Amino acid sequence: MEYGMPEGSYDSVFTYAPYNDLDKMGYMGPKRQGMVLGSKYGNFTYTRDYGQDMEENIKPLSAVELLIYGLSMLFVVMTMPLSLLFALKFISTSEKLVVLRLGRAQKTRGPGIALVVPCIDTTHKVTTSITAFNVPPLQVITIDRGLVELGATVFLKIRDPIAAVCGVQDRNASVRTLANTMLYRYISKKRICDVTNSQDRRIMAANFKDELGAFTCQFGVEITDVEMSDVKIVKEGENMGMSALSSVAKSDAGQQLWQVIGPAFEDFAKECAAENREKEAAPLVDLSDGPSTSSSQPSTSTPSIDIDHLITVANMAIDEHLVRLIGRVFQIDCADVEPICIDLKHGAGSAFKGTSPNPDVTFESRYDIFARIITKDLSPVTAYMNGSLKVRGSIQDAMQLKYLVERMADWI
């Protein structure tokens, strides 16, 4: 028996209807609702179809407008061939011609030759190819109170020529002003570390493109791509924890708390000062019977790691997963040994003696300092703070080398 099957819906049990064809799927489908008669949009339509809806809304000319149009065409015919100099318009492949007849938009013309009525038609040529403009570098205060200078390049394309002409008075100025304002507002909600990171900056550019395109689609402009320029840090961001602690200390509750714990901190500071004075008063040279040692010169030991052994261990620890994770080229310049290049960006990665033409991060230090960092006898942050380790490049990229160091620690 057939339950709920319309008569003649299929020929046999092996007859299949096209995918999602509710009228021929062999059963009574649910009633389809949500579509308005005569409308091209439904309840689940999220994207806009450029270049069609404006032309569909064009109404025919009224009786008076038809009379004026007929008289104008008669005048053009009577003045031929001189009138053809003004009536013929040549449109290239990358252009569209928008015609306003008696102030009312007509269907777009082109490419090719288009005939217009000089007396009553106003024409606008619109380029439909991809164009670009630069957002000048802006100085923006970030959410962590840092100051950065950042610009962008916006690529756009006109999808709806009629909306581009009729929807906004000055399209180019409007898009530029909107991009300038939105970039300032978007960057002001980020932190310094988010803006300087290349991966985060690409994500920001994609989000900025979608947000800007949501506005520009109203007047027929599609944003195809956004490229952000390199970031120039004018002022480093503040430590948010220290800023919050400072604001709490300046409040009434913080003043009352300091009255309670302040004396204890003062006693601790006096004890530290007394210990420092005792150390300064101690003799620099021990004149006892034992062997004399100078306390002013720290003992230095020759690193026990040979540079060839270090490169061998690095190559053993490098694999394709580490290259995909880091994706950077590191250059290590030591004054007492040959330069070392660690390529974690191309192919399966490698470490070798020599230099790289375009390293992402360059370290400058003595080899004994670098060996102590590899063996985890010295923290890289401590070496960087006391000046023993210099970094040229992004600090965030330099910190990515810790993944390789962690692997090498198992082999050294």
Image (spheres, helix red, strand yellow):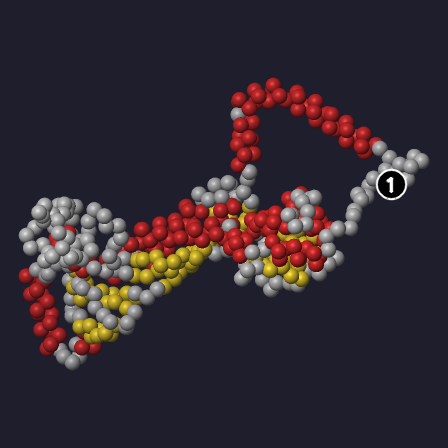
Q: Which residue occupies 25% across, 62% down? A: 161
Crowd rating for badge 1 (residues with CA inside 10 Å; few <14, some 14–19, many 20+): few
Q: Which residue occupies 6% across, 55% down? A: 8
Residue 54 image point, x, y percent: 20, 58
- Identify which residue, 9 or 226, lies in the foreground: 9
Residue 263 image point, x, y percent: 66, 20
Q: Residue furthest bottom?
A: 81
Q: Please determine whether, in this image, residue 296 is positioned above or below residue 313.
A: above
Instruction: Inspect this view and state whether residue 387 appears.
Output: no
Q: In the image, is 165 to the left or to the right of 190? A: left
What residue would you read off at disc 1? 293
Q: Which residue occupies 81% across, 30% down? A: 278
User: Which quadrant of the view contains residue 30?
Assistant: top left
Q: In the image, is 240 to the left or to the right of 333? A: left
Residue 134 image point, x, y percent: 42, 59
Q: In the image, is 26 to the left or to the right of 213? A: left
Q: Specify the amino acid type for callout 1.
A: Thr
Q: In the image, is 264 to the left or to the right of 129? A: right
Q: Secondary structure at mark 1?
A: loop
Residue 74 image point, x, y percent: 9, 73
- Identify which residue, 275 or 3, lies in the foreground: 3
- Identify which residue, 373 or 348, lies in the foreground: 348
Q: Which residue occupies 43% across, 57% down? A: 227
